[in-house]
Image (cartoon, grey):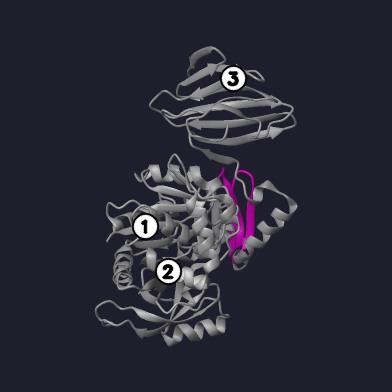
Amino acid sequence: MAVIPVILAGGAGTRLWPLSRQTYAKPFITLESGHSLFQATVLRLAHLAGKKNGLVVCQEEQRFVAAQQLLEVGMAHWKILLEPVGRGTAPAAACAAMWLASQGSDEDILLVSPADHRIGHEDRFNQSVRRAITAASQGNLALLGVVPSHGESGYGYIERGLPLAGGEETFPAFRVGQFIEKPDLERANAMVASGRYYWNSGLFVFRGQTFLGELARLAPNIWSSCEKACRKVVHDLTFLRLEAEAYQHCPNDSIDWAVMEKTGLGVVVPLDAAWSDVGSWSSLWQEGNRDVDGNLAVGDVLLQDVSNSYVHSDSGLLAVLGCEDLVVVQTKDATLVTHRQYSQRVKELVGRLQVMGRAEASQHRRHHRPWGMFETMDCGEGFQVKRLTVRPGASLSFQYHRHRQEHWVVVRGMAEVWREEERFFLRAGESAFIPVGSRHRLANPGPNLLEIIEVQTGSYLGEDDIVRLEDQYGRCM
């Protein structure tokens, strides 16, 4: 019986806007350390699972960044299951369990974890997970409950019931009493004082078949939709595509609501490991390494007469003068300034941007592709300037454009260019012109990154003005 990590990476993390957006969401951003929250989660769970491959569940627009970040931490062999649309943690976990069962892992224990949480003490985390694995091996559905440090109205709570048979001293675990969703602060403080309640971490440990059996009994509509979606999984490189129509008809629900609040098999295992869901800029400030003035500064930041503030620059110098208790976050195309006490309401701003049709609500200027990435540097009427970064050995599709022409200038590395019947190489400082309608391909044959400045001109410059003739990554022609 093996332990298989299942990482749920489908959230948008709108409370960390403008750094976190739908196309490059909270799990994949690097906040302070050298790894993203997603990569840290992968490494943490891979250690517990040994040599068993894991499974990542994410949405279509995040697939390339997920694949790249797995590659960067040596886990490129993990599979990525793609949701056509977001439907909550219950369908995501169900499809993961069903696909793994189809691969002969129906008796294995699944370690289902959000992709965007932070753990301060991994040794304590490992100990709690091993206790949960023991509970799961006895046929229970285990949930890690965070030992609360204070009353918090933004979290859900789990009340512990009687100790699990087998003895509290062997592995402390308790039957679930009840779930309480985001109480007011007065009630939250009272629950914490009682010592009988834990924060709901959203991290589960169970046998796949045990979970699916309870899901079929308690939420048959979810089970049925997921079974249909998994019946027609399409393999696409390292990606697994669920059947879209069946999944779109699946109810949107969480594991808690669909199963855990109704089952008699629920068990809570205490977790005391400096856990955080990094749920807002204020919580990030609270948990970070602040200076003597109470500030946490990230990036190219200059502070003067500033106190108790979180200041983050993702693009250029950010200078702040004479302020306190602020959150200031700057990216290349958007800047957020708010009082720390309002940081939980950032998602309200994102909602307004979405209603206004602003691309900044969900898209970064930087876009990830299987060959690397491109970043929009400037755009205007009839022109657009991009910076392309192509990984060693990678190439763009063989394609043409109906409405635009392109001028490529090599900044770093060496480019291999196909233009109609021509094939030639460009080095730093050299350039090539691609006329409208000309069939072409760009590749990086060297051992180092290739950087290109691409100037587009034409009547229409949208990304859908690409007609693919051949693509090694299997994207639609």
Residue type, numbered disc 3: Arg
Task: Identify the image quadrant of the C terminus.
Answer: top right
Nearer to the camera, 243 or 127: 243
Viewer-closest of 358 and 369: 369
Labels 1 and 3 touching (C-beta < 8 A): no
The residue positioned 52% from the left and 23% from the top of the image is 442
Residue identified by numbered label 1: 5
Q: What element carries label 3?
A: loop
Q: Does the magenta stretch include residue 339?
A: yes
The amino acid at mark 1 is: Pro
**Residue 272 vertical placement versus 405 (above, below):** below
Q: Residue tagged by mark 2?
A: 213
- Looking at the picture, how far across and down is residue 73, in whole percent? 36, 46
Instruction: Name the outermost residue toward the top.
Output: 422
Q: Name the residue under label 3.
A: 439
Q: Which amino acid does label 2 sit on?
A: Gly
For the residue labelled by badge 1, is the local secondary structure a helix, a strand or a loop?
Answer: strand
Q: Percent position (x, y) of residue 283?
A: 51, 65
Circle 3: is it few (<14), some (14-19), or many (20+) Cα within 10 Å? Answer: some
What are the residue bounds of the magenta stretch? 314-340
